[in-house]
Image (cartoon, rainbow, N blue to C red):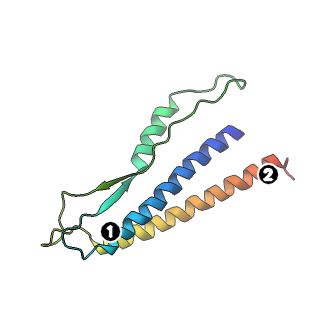
Amino acid sequence: MDITSKINSLKYLEEGLNAASLRHGVISNNIANAETPGFKKSVVLFEEALKEALKRNNNLLKRTNDKHFPGTQQIPGPKIVSLDNTTMRNDLNNVDIDYEMTMLAKNTLMFQALSEQISRKFSSLKTVISGGR
């Protein structure tokens, strides 16, 4: 993997961390408002948009010569969406506390895994820059 590929993968990891961080805040807000009458929970959308962008970008801007500049890839950012069309209780609140706690644990694991990957990428880049020493 060349240095450009490593840098591009860092961009994807960075956006993943941004999405996980934003998702953590959104889930925390949902949990904090679990007993608020009329509150509608929100979710963060990111992974599906990233998959679609990766499919599109795989067919574009391929380097045919090492002397060509690499093309830039558009990475979608995370998006917050409010789920207004569901209700869990008579007070119109739609937060399921058990589900939110499960999503919080899952998101924490995702954030930790992405952080570890970024750490490994930087370690690899450090090795490349230092010439393997």
Residue that protrudes farthest toward the right in the picture: 133
Residue 79: image x %, image y %? Answer: 38, 50
Q: Is residue 13 left or right of residue 106?
A: right
Q: Residue at x 42, y 65 (%)?
A: 25
The residue that disc 2 covers is 127
Residue 128: image x %, image y %? Answer: 79, 47
Q: Quick one: SS at disc 2?
A: helix
Q: Residue at x 73, y 52 (%)?
A: 124
Residue 17: image x %, image y %? Answer: 53, 57
Residue that protrudes farthest toward the bottom in the picture: 35
Which image quadrant: the N terminus?
Answer: top right
Front residue of 32 and 94: 32
Tag shown at residue 30: 1
Tag shown at residue 111: none
Q: Is residue 133 left or right of residue 1?
A: right
Image quarter of residue 87: bottom left
Q: Earlier in the sequence, mark 2 or mark 1?
A: 1
Residue 50: image x %, image y %? Answer: 45, 44
For label 1, the crowd category at 10 Å Cα-Cα, with few meaning under 14, some 14 to 19 and many 20 or more, is: many
Name which residue type carries label 1. Asn
Q: Is residue 114 left or right of residue 2?
A: left
Front residue of 70 and 84: 84
